[in-house]
Amino acid sequence: MFWSAHNRPEVGAPHGEGLRRRLLVVAGVLVVLLAATATAGLLLVKPVQRVSVTITSPTQLVALRPNLWTFEIHNMGPGISDLGLRLTGADGWLTNHSIVYAGTGCRYEAQTDFVLCGSVQQGETRTISIAAAANAPGTHSYQVTFCDCGQNGQPAIAGPTAPQFAMPGSIAAPYVQTWTETVVSGPSVSVTVTDILGHPVSGATVTVLGSALSAITAATGVAQVALGPLGPGSYTVVATNPGSVSANAPITVPSVGDPPAATVVLASSAAALKGGSDPSVMPGAVLIVDEDNNRLIVISPQGQLLWVFPRPGDLSPGQTFVLPDDAFFSPDGTQIIATQEEDFAVTLIDVATHKIVWRYGEPGIHGSGPNQLWNPDDAMVMPNGDVLIADIVNCRIIVVAQGQHTIAHQYGVTGSCHHAPPSRFGSPNGAFPLADGNWLITEINGDWASELAPGGAVLWSTHPPAVAYPSDTNEVGPNRYLTVDYSYPGQVVMFDKAGNTLWRYRPLGAAALNHPSLALPLPNGDVILNDDYNDRVIVVDPKTNTVVWQYGVTGRRGSALGWLANPDGIDLAPPYSLLGQLAGSLKTL
């Protein structure tokens, strides 16, 4: 042994103490040397394969459908030739789950219970997502261990806190990650099926579109549909029942838990059009303002009743809804704005909930002050929620900001009723949007139609030709406008901005119109109009001047299917509604 002063016993040290200290120093040097030789590739020690692992969703509340178990694995070195994951645990993860997909670049070997995912270099992080479906509800504890399965004997991989080196022949303690799962039943969705009046429909079949998943409604009208293997996403449930028109509703299946309940409204398949009517002339359903029946209804092209307001229970205590005059869908189709001309109010209704969400004017009280109107006509909702109202007796056009009860802007002088737009209007009974973003104003006094730009600039004014009482003038196309004569016999007139007649429909005798108040163009070139005092809504073919579709019994009032009482307004249902088609160009006047 080499001997130096450093090997001598320390002066004053107890016997043997100096030797013990020297041996400790030698041992420490030996460890350093062993580590160095291991790095140099000698067999004195071996490096330990180590990984750190993060397990993410789902770790609890697992639904009975395919889910993802994600393992983010960081290899702390050295390289792994074939990374293996073994999902075990006292409750047997593989017993309680069915693997659907073992992850990109991975393979599942049932005979070894390993998911094998190939090589992972030192310092590399791999994310492995295993898709599997739990087989039954319950709460279980599981664990995952890791190996380098490319080596003989499938040596275990240690965790991040294990020693970096080990003696040859030693076995690394396996790295174990544990978690607990609670598997819940479902998901399922509660679907309520009613008729258009809100009455429950029992015995209806509710099916998830594109699947075999279905259920039957109970006496309460509710079906609980088990969604089984459906993964998170958007789906459609369809309700069918003999004697009804099938209808559907969207549902959204969340990652965990049940979707929100859905409601489907089934309309009766019973139809009531006048004989000889051709449903194909209609692009879709039509909203009819049935004034003297105090209701709004939506009718299919075949004459089926699809929607009605108000149903029993729709109005809150103290609310009324009487004498609706005109109504139009909002640009997005979720609301309907109705004017109640003879009740001095404008009412905004949510289509889905059947609830009044805003009202301007005090029902039954006319006036010109804040939150007061006098025979309002043709209110329109802007995309930003503002409402434009033609206020006939007050001789003004007003704009009310969304949800407010004060006037944001006014055209015309209240009570000054003669034609001098934009400062004065002679009893305006219509303000309709145009495709160019401007507005077409109809004035009863003097028979006027005028185009106004936002801000009030008047681009042109003309007299609808040979019309005694113009009503609700609107646009057919470039330089083509449509108005009706609210008279008897009434008429429908198409004209240009110079006042030239382009088409006139004025039948006489038994076929005469009786105070029509609104006509709208249809996409096929026909014209739909409400013939108020004749208690009907009709479609006229301008090429033949014949009625090709009719809902309502001419000159006979009623409220049963196929009957009307003084219908005073119409709008096509989305996507053909007046404001829906012009939503991209609508600008507040």
Image (tube, rainbow, N blue to C red):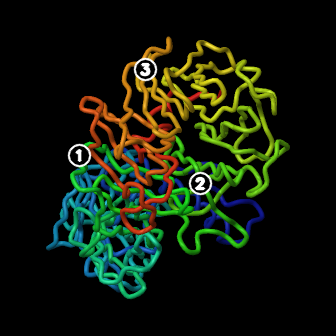
**First of labels 1, 2 by sequence position:** 1
**First of labels 2, 3 by sequence position:** 2
Q: Residue at x 41, y 69 (%)?
A: 560
Q: Which label sits on residue 480?
A: 3
Q: CA distance from mark 1 to mark 3?
A: 25 Å
Q: How many marks?
A: 3
Q: Nearer the viewer, residue 169 or 342?
A: 342
Q: CA distance from mark 1 to mark 2?
A: 28 Å
Please tell me whether mark 1 sits on a helix, a strand or a loop: helix
Q: Relative to 230, say whether 587 is above or below.
A: above
Residue found at the far bottom of this picture: 219
Relative image position of residue 554 (x, y in whole percent): 38, 54
Neighbour tally class for label 1: few under 14, some 14-19, many 20 plus, Cα within 10 Å: few
Relative image position of residue 479 (x, y in whole percent): 44, 16
Relative image position of residue 502 (x, y in whole percent): 38, 19
Q: Which residue is mark 1?
A: 280
- Say if mark 2 contacts mark 3, CB within 8 Å: no
Neighbour tally class for label 3: few under 14, some 14-19, many 20 plus, Cα within 10 Å: some
- Say if mark 1 contacts mark 3, CB within 8 Å: no
Q: Relative to 79, say whether 150 is above or below.
A: below
Q: Which residue is mark 2?
A: 324
Please tell me whether mark 3 sits on a helix, a strand or a loop: strand
Please tell me whether mark 2 sits on a helix, a strand or a loop: loop
